[in-house]
Image (tube, rainbow, N blue to C red):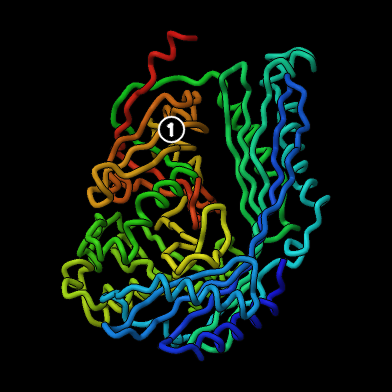
Amino acid sequence: MRTIDELAKAAEEALALVAAQPAVVEAEVFVAANSALLTRLNYTSHIPCNGVEEPKSAESYGIGIQAVFDAPDGRRIGFGSEPSDLTPAGAERALGKARTAAVADPEFVSLPARAASPRTLANYHDPRLMDIDDPSLVAAGWKITGGALRTFTASSRLAALAQDDEALRRLGLILGGDVTILRERIAIASTAMPRAQTDETSLITAFVTAMVESQSAKGSGASTGTRFDHFTDEAGVEAAQNAINAIGGERVPSGTYTVIFGRQPVADLLNNIVIPACTASAFYSSSTPFLGKLGKVVASRHLSVYDDGAMPGLMGSKGITCEGLPTGRTELIKHGVLAGCLSNWYESQRLLRDPALEEKLGARGPAAKAALVPRNGFRFGAGGGRQFDSPPGVAASNVVLEGAEPMTLDELVRRVGDGLYIGRIWYTYPINGLRAGDFTCTVVADSYIIRDGRIAEPLKANAIRINDNIATVLNNIAGTTKDVKGTIVWAADEVVYAPEVAVTGVHVDEIAGFMEELD
C-alpha cells in the first residue's frame, strides 16, 4: 500500500504541474490509496467445509483532478483521474481527461475554500490494522467462527433436539458472512489550500448469518470497530444465539402494532429514508419530506439525530473530508426540530444562492448558512474506500440517534406491553418518491412477539412487511433503550450508533402465507 508521504508528495507535485498549464483558473488534486482485506466464513455442519475460506485482498491507488478552465464562452469545470500512476505523467493524463470532460455549470461557484476552524481529529488509525498480515486476517475469521460454534454446542435448546454430536450436525448448523478490514490513505492539495493535507483511516467489521436449517431458523450478528486489539467473537456468538432463539417462529396477522425497532432496523430506516432526506441536494431538488421545515418540528421532542465525523473511536470518523475540510458535528434533528443537513462545498454554495432557498430549506441568511456547513463531502465507493476516480458527493459518517429518556430493554418491553420486537429488516426503500415519506421493508430475522410486557415467541422470518410513513416512526416515539451499538447496513456509507426504539401505530402486513402450505 502506498505510504502517506508518497501520496502527499504526489498531490503537491501534481498541483504545481496543473497550476502551470494554460487556461487553468483553479484546481484540486486528490490522491488516494485503498486496501480491502476480507476473509469469508463458510461453516456447514452437515456438508464438508473449511469453516473459514477465501481470504483475499484488493488494493487501488491513483490521482483525481478537478479543474476550472477559462474558455471563450465562459468558465468550464471538469474532472479526470488516472489509476496506478502518481508520477507527473499520470497527473498530465488526469488533467487531460478533466479538460476533455469540462462543461459549463451555471451553479458552480468555486472549489472549496479554507475552513475557518481547524481539524480536530488526527493520528487516529490503528497501526496494527494498517500492517496486518495474512495469518492474522485468517485468525480473525476463525475467532468469529469459533464463537458461533461454541454457542451452538453449548445450547441446551439444540441438545434437546439432538441427543448426540452426529444428530447435532444433522440439524444443519450453518454459518456464513465475512470479516472485512478497510484501510484508507488520502492526500489533497488545491489552489486555495496548496499544502497537502493527509488522512489515514482503518476499520474492521464482521457480518454473520447463522442458521439451524432443519428448524427453518436464522439469526444475524455484526460488529464494528477501529482497533484490531478490540476485535472479539461477538458477531458469531450473537448470530448463533439469534438463530437458536428463532426456532419455532410464529406468524402474526396484518394490523397496527407498537413496535420496538432493533438497532439494525433503526440504522436501515435512517440510511434509506431519513439521511437521504437530510441532504442539501434533497432540499435543492425539493425531494425531501422535510421541505421548508428548517427550525420546525418534524419528529417527537424525545428524538435527536446528528452526524459527527470527528468523534474519536467511532468507526466512521475521518480527520478531513475528501474536499480537505474538517469533519465535525452536524445537528440534523434536535429534540424533534429540524436543525441542519449534510452537505459538501458545491451543494452548500448552490443551495445558498438559490432564489427559492427560503421556500426549499425554510430559512435564509445566517440560519441557512449555519445549517449548510460542508462537513460531509466524501468520495466513497461501493465496497468502501475513498475513491480517487470520482468527485466529492455527500455522505454521512457517524450518525447518532438519541432518546430523551433512555431505559433498559426490559423496561421498554414492559412499557410496550403487547406488540412486536423487530430485529432485522431488508429491502427498505421509499415508495411514491422520497418526498412522500412512504416506505416499505421486509422483516427477515431476529424478531419476536411481545406479550404481557415480555418477549414471547419468535416471529417467523419473511412473514410480514412494514408499510408505513417515516413520519409515523419519527413522531410516535414511545421510548428508547440506553445501550448504543455501531451498526452498518447493506451498501451504507455511514455507521449508525443507535439504541432500540419503540414506536406506536406501525402498520404491518402479513405476507407469503401460501408458503405454509408447502411445508
Residue that mark 1 sits on = 443
- Residue at the (56%, 52%) spot, across then down: 383
Q: Position of residue 35 (x, y in %)?
A: 67, 59
Identified at 75% across, 67% down, the residue is: 127
State the image quarter where residue 23 is shown.
bottom left
Depth order, front residue of 85/154: 85
Other residues around mark 1 within 10 Å, as few (<14) / some (14–19) / many (≥20): many
Query: 32 or 100: nearer the eye?
Result: 100
Considering the numbered disc 1 on the image, is that residue within a helix, a strand or a loop? strand
Q: In the image as oriented, which residue stretches furthest toward the right?
A: 135
Q: Is residue 326 visible?
A: no
Q: Residue at x 33, y 32 (%)?
A: 257
449 with respect to 93 (left or right): left
Q: Is residue 364 left or right of residue 247?
A: left
Mark 1: amino acid: Val
Give residue 486's position: percent from left, percent from top: 55, 53
Number of numbered labels in the structure image: 1
Give how far across and how far down residue 33 sits, in percent.
64, 67
Q: Is residue 2 above or below residue 113?
A: above
Closer to us: 485 or 517: 517
Is 493 placed left or right of 158 in the picture?
left
Rendering quarter of residue 345: bottom left
Is residue 509 something that shows in the picture?
Answer: yes
Residue 139 % position (x, y): 80, 46
Q: Residue at x 72, y 56 (%)?
A: 230
Q: Quadrant of the N terminus?
A: bottom right
